[in-house]
Image: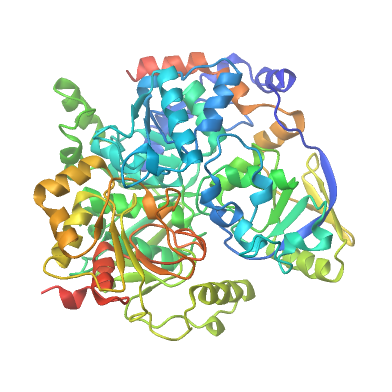
Amino acid sequence: MSAPKFSTLTSRCVVLPVQDVDTDQIIPARFLKVTDKLGLGEKLFCDWRYLDDGSPNPKFVLNQPEARGAQVLVAGHNFGCGSSREHAPWALVGFGFQAVISTMFADIFKGNAVKNGLIPVVIEPAAHAALVAQRAGQPDLEITIDLKSQTVSWLGQMPLMFPIDPFSRTCLLEGVDELGYLQKFQKQAEAHEAAHA
Amino acid sequence: MERGLRTLSERVGDAALHLKPGFQMSSSPKTLFQKIWDSHVVAEEPGAPTVLYIDLHLVHEVTSPQAFSVLKERGLKVRRPGRTVATMDHSIPTKGGYEAADEPGRIQLRLLESNAQANGVRIYGLDSVQRGIVHVIGPEQGFTQPGMTIVCGDSHTSTHGAFGSLGFGIGTSEVGHVLATQCLLQRKPKTCEVRIDGALRPGVTAKDIILAVLAQIGVGGGTGHVFEYTGAAIRALDMEGRMTVCNMSIEGGARAGMVAPDDKTFNFVNGREFAPQGAAWDKAVAHWRTLPTDAGATFDKTVTLDASTLEPMVTFGTNPGQGVAITQPLPQPSSLADANERAGLEKSLAYMKFEAGKPILGQPVDVVFLGSCTNSRIGDLRAAAGLLKGRKVAKNVRMMVVPGSQSVKLAAEAEGLDKIFKAADADWREAGCSMCIAMNGDQLSPGQLAVSTSNRNFEGRQGKGGRTVLASPLTAVASAVAGRIADPRPLMS
């Protein structure tokens, strides 16, 4: 069983600099009645993205021309807070995103993201503000994320290191599957159970 | 994949897999969290997260279908069905019966039943008199015990920390990991002491404590940390109050919140169906008494609050950290120096249709919701009914009372609480998550304002376009009676 692989990515970006975006906004609860992972990209940010009549809200960033094909989301501080729903990264990946850049991610979201090949890239507030400002004047600005060197860069910006759990990085680079990894510890788990029975 | 797996373990060799670093540190003072963590380490490889043993896995219909699918695809079964408990809560109707749920909801409920049956997992189905919200029935049935590691595909698993256990929410991939292996890969979080000194004044409750904590630290303030709630005000709370506090730890960004177990904890657990009995009980209590944080143990950070200064709290914005004392005016965006925070506050006030600087008291209310894993236990219903008795819900207000479990419902009916709610024109329902997450048809209409005892006031959380003010059961009842956001204290003689 193979997990999603990731090495480098160069792509235009969508900027949604709202802070404390919760997973209810990323994918509202009424879409959680699925029993698979399909079709959630259509519902990503549903209540911000569509007007009451179901038509796209032209003011929302995902509906602007430069969003088409963008694989990087530049988000605000504390992205993905609230509910643990993994439907949030499923919806982001379903839309086509492969990375989210923020100054901080909520813990559960961050864990769910990497398990779905979605890279949470944390950069300093100053660099984040500079990126948002530069992108405002340059809608087709491309961002490069290199997981091997753990760097993110864009035009005029030298590569910036970003932190990522080394195990998550290895899993993403090599397509290692966490469940497969965990299964190797069944003897130790049995020993733990025997010791604590 | 195989190549990657071997690389990781070849690097260290088998001997390292048996390391249990926690046991080497047994002489130095430890926190409650550290003790539970250390005693659940199954293995640690350099460069990899800890393999942590999970004692109790709670499962519900919304976050488990894709995890069971992974097991099926790989020909795996649930490894420890006896440590796994399933219930139906999110999608279920509160009017009773499958026919009230929509088609996708029905499919999800039936799938949970068949997945549980195929794996020998205990399930509290729709016809069970013990069915209820996962975080209500865990403690109620005695599954939740001090010292345990407890997970669920649900962020409010932090509730169980009230018993001195380590309970935290996980994603669906991790639900699959625990189903298949009874283990999880986890990095050790930092610890944060949340010390609540002093004594609460009348009309101020556990819910007001946690809303005040969240207003102080913000929704991201606990990220990367596990909270341990300490101090006189926490010790004075009953188990239900402690559950309310721990429940909303995640709203501050902390995956888990804990309270050291004491005699109140043991008395609550004692005699419940799945609690240890006889000699096993005595042995368990002896162990549980060793769990509280040692004198001299340190936390990575500390937050303090004086309970005696607190008033009833309400939220005014679109995240649980946006709260104020009910008598205070709404904050001014211009008072915030940070541009992003200012924009966030402006956006929240605009969504809520509230005006900066104005009082929140007196805002007209359309709906009052008494329920959710935060405030739907028998003590919550008693407190609410006590204040509502002899009064009526205002004509323009719809009040829903949704017990946290069918057991709570039956207990409330045995005490006649249902009669008080019905006499006041409140709607008395079957157990479930209901309008906290609005997946089952119980929801706000666009623009409606609810005073809710639940845990999240995110945009659209209780129905698209709905506006939520989080509050205690007492404040909810006072607001239902007034038809406006109201302070419960004047009603309390």
Residue B53 seen anywhere in this rendered image of the structure:
no
The scheme the figure's colours follow is: rainbow
Counting the numbered discs, the total is 0
Residue B11 seen anywhere in this rendered image of the structure:
yes
The foreground one among B294 and B258 is B258
In percent of the image, x 62 and y 37: which residue is there? A37
Residue B436 lies, in percent from the top left, at 40, 54
Residue A141 lies, in percent from the top left, at 87, 61
In the image, residue A183 sits, relative to residue B368, either above or below, namely: above
In the image, residue B82 sits, relative to residue B257, either above or below, namely: above
Question: Quadrant where the N terminus of chain A lies?
Answer: top right
Side (left or right) of A147 relative to A45: right
Residue B455 lies, in percent from the top left, at 39, 57
Answer with the quarter of the image where residue A26 lies.
bottom right
Residue B490 lies, in percent from the top left, at 18, 78
In percent of the image, x 38 and y 44: which residue is there? B100
Question: Quadrant where the C terminus of chain A lies?
Answer: top left
In percent of the image, x 77 and y 45: which residue is there? A150
Side (left or right) of A8 relative to A112: right
In percent of the image, x 83 and y 51: which residue is there? A69
Residue that lies at the very extreme toward the front in this rendered image: B99
Side (left or right) of A143 relative to B187: right
Answer with the quarter of the image where residue B422 lies.
bottom left
